[in-house]
Amino acid sequence: MSAAPTATGDSNPTGRESWSAYLDLLVVYVVWGSTYLAIRVAVGEGGGFPPFIMGAMRVLLAGVLLLLWAGLTRSRLRPTKEELLVLAVSGILLWTGGNGLVMWAEQRADSAYAALLVGSTPIWVAVMMAFLDRRPPSWLLAGSLLIGFAGLVLLTAPVLATGTRADTLAVIALLAAPVSWGIGSLIQNRRPVGMSVIASSAYQHLFGGAGFLVLVLIFNEPLPNPTPAAWWAWGYLVVFGSLLAFTSFVRALRSLPTNIVMTYAYVNPVIAMILGRLILNEAITAWTVGGAALILLGVAGVFRDRYVNGTATAPRALKATGPAR
């Protein structure tokens, strides 16, 4: 595709990492782990929000607010043609493809089944990176990813053992979602734009929102009739899930290797499990504790691989027509 990388390896465009980048990743770990509950309240049974309408309302409002924020901070708002293409493709892949397919599929599949398939995102990304770089992942990285996924299997095993509900279309959507998110993330990491994080995140939200509107028309979704709790959940998703966490995700992808950032897909279910215990008083069993331990072990291995095997040459940012802020 036109946004394919021109440099080998996976690194950051500045050639250096900082604690602020890991703080951004921590925000993604915690906040996106909490959005499982918010999405369930908003689009679950009785919530009143059709999934694609909720997605469109969420990301379009976030995109407008981010664009206003970028303007107030005097960031460059006009992307080049090449930057616009990267932002459009990555925004649609991340939001409409990655997020939208999961929300649609969760109407036809149990959440544990969805969490398991979406949790394969780090593995898909590693496979795609190996193909693009023409270099297989290290044994440490491959083993760590498999350990983390095994932990996810254990984490969801109690629910899966009771019998899962997922039709063929839901399975296809849940397999396509992590691939779509992974491709969008790789494009964003390897073809970084010269605009500020806020401005680029704004455009990705707006393009993703446009994609959601197309899906609303295709599926002819009914008008929303959300409950007060669903409105609060939607507001949480806008402020914390999009304005805070997605912007942190974009910033982390600019500063950290993609494999490191993708570990969020393993950690989020652990955070969701903890919040489920604290807020909904959900049970924590030996299965969930063992699964969480394996997930954290796998994530630690991915971080360890980063510093044992190092990185290759950093990609070059797209040429900008004005100063980035």
Image (cartoon, grey):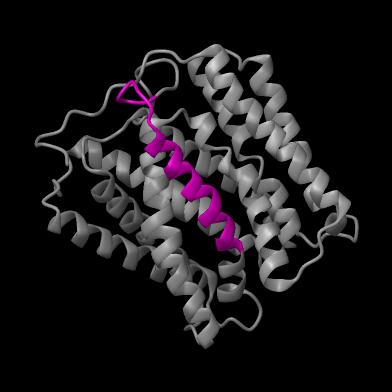
Query: What's drawn in magenta, residue-wise?
Result: 12-36
Residue 226 at least partly seen: no
Question: Can you tell which quarter of the image residue 282 is in?
Answer: bottom right
The quadrant of the rendering that contains the C terminus is top left
At horizontal 33% and vertical 63% (from top left) the residue drawn is 62
- Report whether 62 appears left or right of 37: left
Residue 318 seen from this side: yes
Above-or-below relation of 155 to 261: below
As drawn, is 45 to the left or to the right of 157? left
Nearest the eye: 207 or 44: 44
Q: Which residue is found at the position 23% from the left and 29% from the top?
A: 318
Q: Report x, y in % for residue 137.
A: 61, 17
Q: Nearer the viewer, residue 167 or 288?
A: 288
Quadrant the N terminus occupies: top left
Type of secondary structure dominating the magenta stretch? helix
Q: Picture coordinates of residue 63 (x, y %)? A: 30, 60
Quarter of image, res 213: bottom left
Q: How many marks?
A: 0
Q: Is residue 126 above or below residue 29?
A: above
Q: Nearer the viewer, residue 277 or 64?
A: 277
Q: Position of residue 91 (x, y in %)?
A: 38, 48
**Residue 261: within the magenta?**
no
Percent position (x, y) of residue 2?
34, 30
Q: At 21% across and 35% down in the image, what residue appears?
A: 194
Write down the quadrant of residue 298 in the picture.
top right
Residue at x-position 53% and y-position 78%:
49
**In the rendered structure, does residue 30 fall within the stretch colored magenta?**
yes
**Residue furthest toward the right?**
162
